[in-house]
Amino acid sequence: MDNLAAVIRLLKKQGRLTKELRGIGAALAAFGHVYGKGTGTRKLSASARARIAAAQRARWAKVRENAGKSAKVVPIRGKRTLSAAARKRMAAAQRARWAKVKAAKRMA
């Protein structure tokens, strides 16, 4: 009989837990609609990015102009590209690392 009482208590506790979880889920869903609009990723066109970059360069030019010689602004270096040989070396090294991981899994 004690075992049956324990099972009933456990089921009641789980029922309460389920009810609480449903309430939390509903609250999160409600908040998700309110705050969820700004969570996506923005995709800008190349021209839009170029306009933004040009505007930022103009702002920095104005700052430098107003600050005179005392302002030290570090120029941003352009993107570097890897040679085909470097990419092949990196790919081979990555394949070797994965082979080592897989071999360790087989041994364990």
Image (cartoon, rainbow, N blue to C red):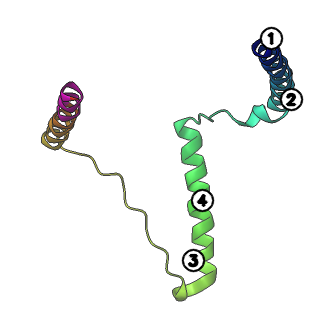
Q: How far separated are the C-alphas under marks 1 and 2?
A: 39 Å
Q: CA distance from mark 3 to mark 1?
A: 84 Å
Q: Is 1 left or right of 76, judged from the image as shown?
A: right
- The residue at which mark 1 appears reads as 1
Q: Earlier in the sequence, mark 2 or mark 3?
A: 2
Q: Amino acid at mark 1?
A: Met
| Residue type, mark 3 in image | Arg
CA separation in Å, label 4 and label 3: 12 Å
Tell me which label, 1 or 4, sits earlier in the chain: 1
Q: How many residues crowd around disc 2 within 10 Å: few (fewer than 14), some, or many (20 or more)?
A: few
Position of 24 relative to 89 (above/below) = above
Instruction: Please tell me which residue lies in front, 38 or 49.
Output: 38
**Percent coordinates x, y for residue 66 in the rendering:** 64, 81
Nearest the viewer among 85 and 10 is 10
* Of 10 and 77, the residue lying toward us: 10
- The location of residue 68, given as percent across then percent down, is 57, 86
Residue span colored magenta: 99-107
**Circle 3 crowding by C-alpha within 10 Å: few under 14, some 14–19, many from 20:** some
Do the residues under discs 3 and 1 have CB atoms within 8 angstroms?
no
Rendered image quadrant of residue 95: top left
According to the picture, the residue beneath numbered tag 3 turns out to be 64
Residue furthest to the bottom in view is 70
Q: Going from the N terminus, do you reach mark 3 or mark 1 first?
A: 1
**Looking at the picture, which amino acid does disc 4 mark?**
Gln
